[in-house]
Image (tube, rainbow, N blue to C red):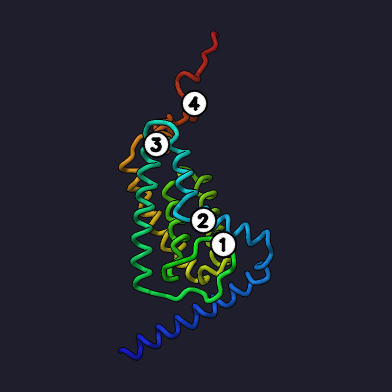
Amino acid sequence: MTTSVSDSSSTYSTAASAIDAAVDSAFEPLRGKPAVDRAAAVVSNLADYGLVWVLLAAFKARRRGPDRRRAVVGLGAAGLSSLVVSRVVKAAVERQRPDDHLDAAVRAPSTSSFPSGHTLAAFCTAFVLSESDAQTAANVAFASAVAASRVHLRAHHPTDVVGGAAIGSVLGLGLKPIVDLVTPGTRRGRRRGRRRERPARSTGMGRRDVVLEPL
């Protein structure tokens, strides 16, 4: 039994290493180009400590009411849960980070590599703060840019950000309905209510559609 588990772990490690090597080689031609390196650093710094999500929540909370409550509750729930989950998984896996970090103006990492905390938090918050399909698409696009920036900067192995994206997405999709439930009356809820109350259009001919012509 022990041999079987060891073999499975070795197989997984070999597959992860192969994926990491292939993806990392695809990023290599872009490294060292000042514009690309700066862009990766900016995106990574925007996600550091959830800065961009704090700004987004502040924009959503600019007016009093249910939307402000949802923004505050959503940001708090996503931030706390992603931090706890990330630390628990990091402590369990304890994977070493890439040896050579790209020289860029970003905070030096101090925790283990798997999963990418930036990516996990970005995907989790992207789903929780979204209130429409368009917002979800925009938020997930930025979260994907965060994941790419962490690989470009060699702050994480590619499989670290894949794991972070997967865990963060599941966490965010699980938290979203809970946040909606505890913060009723938001624009999202009102739009749903209006769709439910919209009367169905009548089709066919009713009594009022009949016009009697005098003989």
Estimate the spatial distance between the alpha carbons at disc 4 and disc 3, rounded to whole Å.
Answer: 47 Å
Number of other residues with Cα within 10 Å of mark 1, as a class: few under 14, some 14 to 19, many 20 or more: many
Residue at 63%, 62% (x, y): give it. Answer: 37
Chain-order first, disc 4 or disc 2? 2
Q: Residues within 10 Å of mark 4 (few under 14, many from 20)?
A: few
Number of the label disc, if any, that sits on residue 205: 4
Q: Which residue is mark 3?
A: 68
Which element is circle 1 on?
helix
Mark 1 or mark 4: whose residue is earlier in sequence: 1
Q: Secondary structure at mark 3?
A: helix
Image spot of residue 215 (x, y percent): 55, 8
Q: Amino acid at mark 2?
A: Ala
Between discs 4 and 3, the one toward the N terminus: 3
How many residues crowd around disc 3 within 10 Å: few (fewer than 14), some, or many (20 or more)?
A: some
Q: Amino acid at mark 4?
A: Met
Q: Which residue is nearer to you in this view: 57 or 37?
A: 37
Q: Which residue is label 2 attached to?
A: 143
Amino acid at circle 1: Ser
Q: Which residue is mark 1?
A: 149
Q: Position of residue 88 (x, y in %)?
A: 33, 66
Of marks 1 and 4, the one in the foreground: 1
Between the C-alphas of marks 2 and 1, the distance is 10 Å
Labels 2 & 3 near each other (Cβ < 8 A)? no
* Spatial separation of the CA atoms under disc 1 and disc 4: 61 Å
Front in this rendered view, residue 1 or 81:
81
Of the two numbered discs 2 and 1 on the same chain, state the one appearing first in sequence. 2
Q: CA distance from mark 4 to mark 2?
A: 53 Å
Q: Amino acid at mark 3?
A: Arg
